[in-house]
Amino acid sequence: MTDVAIKQRLRKQPLEVGANLVARTAVAALTMLDQIRRSSERPIPLAWAPKEPERWRVIEVYPAATRVGHGAPDVGGSLEGLDELLDCSVVLPALMQSEDGVDATVCTLAAADFLFGRAIPPLDNNTASVEGWIWAPMSRQ
């Protein structure tokens, strides 16, 4: 979802890519994705629909938008309000003590939302392919 769509639908403003550490994190993620593509010898394209022929795909997500979309509090590094959706019983406790680890867990919920058709698709694929799209669920608030 574009920044405007996230802000309008979920009342949540995504951070600018150039803001604070977001740019460095985005570059690190893209570098890691490129390394995975090379080592796996797979293209790993952006996914635009749950059922596409390529099994290895990637989507853009925003943990805060996923939390808010599921009606949970907008608290970074928190699973509060998501316990009915996530079973973390087999997750290492040390991972759940890290804000980044918890946010990564919320990203897996965003992936499930995408795969099960609970994430809102772009209305204009051409614009989304240029500007990007943050996959998030329909707001339940």
Image: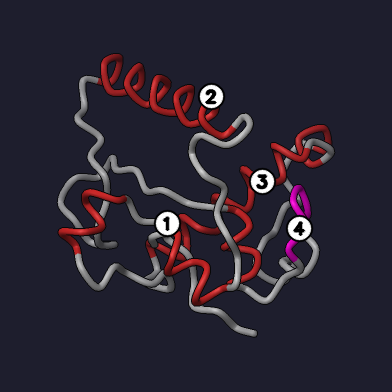
Q: Residue at image x 42%, y 60%? A: 135
Does the stretch in magenta take in 123? no
Mark nearer the N terminus (1 vs 2): 2
In the visual, does 9 lie left or right of 102?
A: left
Mark nearer the N terminus (3 vs 1): 3
Residue to which mark 2 is pinned? 24
- Local SS, label 4: loop
Please state which of the two labelled residues, at mark 3 or mark 1, is closer to the viewer.
1
Please state which of the two labelled residues, at mark 4 or mark 1, is closer to the viewer.
1
Does 10 sit above or below residue 22?
below
* Distance CA(mark 2)–CA(mark 4): 25 Å
* Distance CA(mark 4)–CA(mark 1): 20 Å
Residue to which mark 3 is pinned? 103
Q: What amino acid does circle 2 point to?
A: Arg
Label 1 packing within 10 angstroms: few (<14), some (14-19), many (20+): many
Residue to which mark 1 is pinned? 134
Does the stretch in magenta take in 77? yes
Mark nearer the N terminus (3 vs 4): 4
Where is the N terminus found, in terms of image quarters?
A: bottom left
Label 4 packing within 10 angstroms: few (<14), some (14-19), many (20+): many
Please state which of the two labelled residues, at mark 2 or mark 3, is closer to the viewer.
2
Mark nearer the N terminus (4 vs 1): 4
Residue 32 x/y as whole percent: 42, 21
* Distance CA(mark 3)–CA(mark 1): 15 Å
Q: What amino acid does circle 1 point to?
A: Ile
Residue 89 x/y as whole percent: 76, 51
Residue 14 x/y as whole percent: 55, 54
Label 3 packing within 10 angstroms: few (<14), some (14-19), many (20+): many
Q: Which residues are magenta?
A: 74-78
